[in-house]
Amino acid sequence: MRLSYCTNVHPAEDLDGIIAQLHGHAGPARRAAGLGRLGVGLWLPVDAAALLARDASARARLAEALESEGLDLFTVNAFPYRGFHEDVVKLGVYSPDWTTAERLAFTRDCATALAHLLPEGSAGSISTLPLGWREGWTAAHDEAAAANLAALHAHLAQLERETGRVVRIAVEPEPGCILDDVADVVGWLAARPALIADGRIGVCLDTCHLAVSYADPAAAVRAIDDAGVRVVKVQASAALEVPDPSNARSALAEFAEARYLHQVRTHPGGGQVLRADDLVDVLADPDWPTDRPWRVHVHIPLHLTPRSPLASTQRVLREAVGAVLETEHGREAHLDIETYTWTVLPAEMRPTTLADGIAGELRWAARELAAAIDGPIARTKEQEMVR
């Protein structure tokens, strides 16, 4: 798989800011990790996407910045629309949803921009939200979303005819959404065979979300493959694990913050699976059970382990990547490290610089997922010693 890190960790909302983050963070992270080249999974907010879709000179500026820093662009994160670093994001990240013309236009712009920016011979991928948040969703919403994705599918085919470049869409299941888990996204896509027949629309397997759902990684990937759906992209991420919640409330309080939603699920072995939309609600509920493990939607840096009594679901990532590689198109999937939570993590988990943190994750991936990563990884002796 081709390795990248996702730039939704950076707050830039316009082209100047995106280019500045490439020079200030992505390039330094590549050098600190000892990589000759590095992929970036670019987050394109709506206004930047629109500019890059219509303006060849803007694309040329971005391409020049990428090349000057030794960066390759082959995947885009089109899940957040804008404002992903506002003081409070929470449910806002799911708007506009896939019933709207705004979501379709935004994703079309991301696809157009990516098609023109792809390196020669590369296919592109774009991750997107799982239709929308579950509340208020009706059959009419479902069909409107399907119609918009069909229109996007037609746009992707047109782009290939015009540019010769293949761009694929990866629908990303997330707890609490219409497509909450792998079973949901497989069932929804398989019921619409025209969307998946040529592989243009498939799944983004976020391994933090997968872990929170308590799915068996290998079985989940087999279910995707058996349904004739393609894993287009793997978002390499780890969830927060709580093996014994009875003595973990004070440790968990450090992760209960105001910006992002942190969904919670209890272990299915404890009887009925309990679901909460946010960790802050769980910690405020004295009746929430502590007699079974929990998993929490917090993206934990891949190379770090939370302080006891907490843990990380790194093993889910390893198992999922191994299973994807066994599928027909698994080696064509993109592997994008997506830890956007650095600024809201407990202080002890924050790096000296963001580039240092990203480099740490890249080195971890090079070591732990070496068999899955396409291309050599070059390191100096000093970097090996630090690792």
Image (spheres, rainbow, N blue to C red):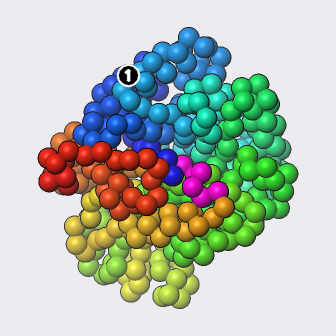
Check if residue 331 falls in the magenta segment.
Answer: yes
Of residue 5 and residue 152, the one placed in the foreground of this image is 5
Magenta-drawn segment: 329-335
With 341 as the anchor, is 162 left or right in this view?
right
- Crowd rating for badge 1 (residues with CA inside 10 Å; few <14, some 14–19, many 20+): few
Task: Return the residue found at the far top.
Answer: 57
Residue 217 in the image, given as x and y percentages of width and height: 53, 72
Q: Residue at x 43, y 25 (%)?
A: 66
Name the residue that disc number 1 marks: 68
With 367 as the anchor, is 292 left or right in this view?
right
Relative vertical location of residue 336 with respect to residue 61 in this rendering, above or below: below
Residue 261 in the image, given as x and y percentages of width and height: 46, 54
Indicate the quadrant where residue 352 lies. Answer: top left
Of residue 260 and residue 350, the one placed in the foreground of this image is 350
With 8 as the anchor, is 176 left or right in this view?
right
The residue type indicated by label 1 comes to Ser
Q: Residue at x 65, y 17 (%)?
A: 54
Of residue 264 and residue 363, the one placed in the foreground of this image is 363
Of residue 140 and residue 373, the one placed in the foreground of this image is 373
Residue 344 shows in this picture: no
Q: Residue at x 54, y 23 (%)?
A: 48
Residue 202 shows in this picture: yes
Check if residue 332 falls in the magenta segment.
Answer: yes
Question: Number of marks in the image?
Answer: 1
Q: Secondary structure at mark 1?
A: helix
Residue 386 in the image, given as x and y percentages of width and height: 15, 52
Residue 373 in the image, given as x and y percentages of width and height: 45, 53
Indicate the quadrant where residue 312 lies. Answer: bottom left
Looking at the figure, which quarter contains the C terminus?
bottom left
Q: Residue at x 81, y 43 (%)?
A: 150
With 81 as the anchor, is 249 left or right in this view?
left
